[in-house]
């Protein structure tokens, strides 16, 4: 390998050392890019132009990151509490029903390519998990911490499973296009993205039915766990009073 090719790899040790020393990741990556560009002989102004071009091309990612502080600000001013209060006003709402409805909507929207419609930071944490917990509180009163964490875990699992199996039905999804390109590179030209998406339908339906069955049993499981916890609390209170 020629020296010029070796110099193109100089950014790798810079990134490794910078991360190992816990420097600011943005500064480390920027420095690695600058050093690599100068080492291979790029003009400084051309290097800056390349940085600017890549930044503009990825500005959609930067705008998506701005959503996180907005959601944090909404949570600070009571978004979770308002979601719980709203669910408490719906008599037919239960934890299992809320999660089942979200699962169906999430998988269907993912199949249509609307992958950003839900997600952990923008939907599960500020809305879905508080709503599911609020429905359980409305039915059973105070909940033990372990049960609250389990409800939050079920909410996160709904988003993960529904997205994972739903996105494979979208023919413009990256994994579907990657499989199609791989098959064509290896001489298989008869498989189209639509065919791959259709073959994903049985799996998606199985995931839907299995997860809905699990969620249909969640309400009864919550009731049993709350009852057992209340019994333990009553025994502990009686023992404390006797002493």
Image (tube, grey):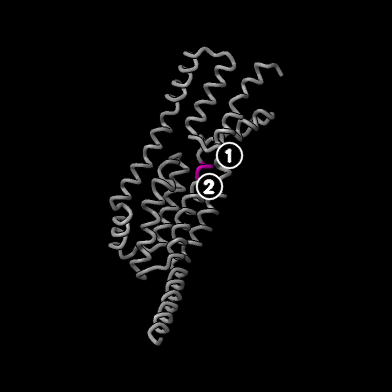
> Which residue corresponds to the image point at 40% horizontal and 56% vertical from the top-left?
129
The one of 164 and 206 positioned closer to us in this rendering: 164
Give the mark, 2 or 1, whose residue is nearer the N terminus: 2
- List x then y, in percent, for residue 218: 46, 65
Residue 167 on the magenta span: yes
Q: Is residue 111 above or below residue 207?
A: above
> Which residue corresponds to the image point at 29% horizontal and 58% vertical from the top-left?
86
Query: Which label belongs to residue 89?
Result: none
What secondary structure is found at the residue carrying circle 1?
A: helix
The one of 55 and 19 positioned closer to us in this rendering: 19
Quadrant of residue 191 in the image?
Answer: top right
Disc 1 marks which residue? 196
> Which residue corresponds to the image point at 44% horizontal and 74% vertical from the top-left?
229
The one of 5 and 155 positioned closer to us in this rendering: 5
Query: Which label belongs to residue 165?
Result: 2
Specify whether 211 is left or right of 6: left
Q: Quadrant of the C terminus?
A: bottom left
C-alpha separation, residue under disc 2 versus residue under disc 1: 13 Å
What secondary structure is found at the residue carrying circle 2?
A: helix
Residue 205 on the magenta span: no
The one of 71 and 114 positioned closer to us in this rendering: 71
> Which residue corresponds to the image point at 37% horizontal and 51% vertical from the top-left?
126
> How crowded is the residue under tag 1: few (<14 C-alpha within 10 Å), some, or many (20+)?
some
The answer to the question of whether label 2 and label 1 lie on touching residues, with beta carbons closer than 8 A, is: no
Please provide the residue range marked out in magenta. 165-169
Q: Residue furthest right?
A: 1
Specify whether 205 is left or right of 59: right
- List x then y, in percent, for residue 58: 45, 28
- List x then y, in percent, for residue 183: 65, 32
């Amino acid at each position: 390998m020629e020296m010029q090719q070796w110099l193109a790899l100089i950014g790798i040790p810079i990134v490794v050392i910078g991360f190992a020393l816990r420097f600011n990741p943005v500064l480390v990556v920027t420095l690695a890019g600058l050093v690599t560009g100068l080492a291979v002989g790029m003009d400084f102004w051309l290097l800056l132009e390349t940085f600017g071009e890549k930044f503009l091309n990825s500005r959609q990612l930067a705008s998506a990151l701005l959503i996180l502080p907005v959601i944090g600000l909404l949570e600070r001013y009571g978004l979770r509490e308002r979601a719980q209060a709203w669910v408490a006003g719906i008599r037919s709402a239960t934890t299992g029903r809320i999660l089942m409805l979200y699962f169906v909507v999430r998988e269907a929207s993912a199949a249509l390519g609307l992958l950003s419609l839900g997600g952990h930071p923008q939907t599960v944490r500020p809305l879905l998990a508080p709503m599911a917990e609020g429905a359980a509180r409305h039915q059973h009163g105070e909940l033990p911490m372990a049960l609250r964490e389990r409800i939050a875990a079920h909410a996160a699992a709904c988003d993960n499973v529904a997205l994972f199996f739903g996105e494979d039905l979208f023919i413009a999804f990256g994994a579907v296009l990657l499989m199609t390109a791989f098959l064509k590179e290896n001489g298989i030209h008869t498989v189209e993205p639509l065919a791959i998406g259709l073959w994903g339908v049985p799996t998606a339906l199985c995931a839907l039915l299995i997860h809905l069955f699990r969620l249909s049993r969640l309400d009864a499981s919550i009731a049993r766990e709350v009852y057992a916890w209340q019994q333990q609390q009553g025994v502990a209170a009686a023992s404390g009073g006797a002493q």
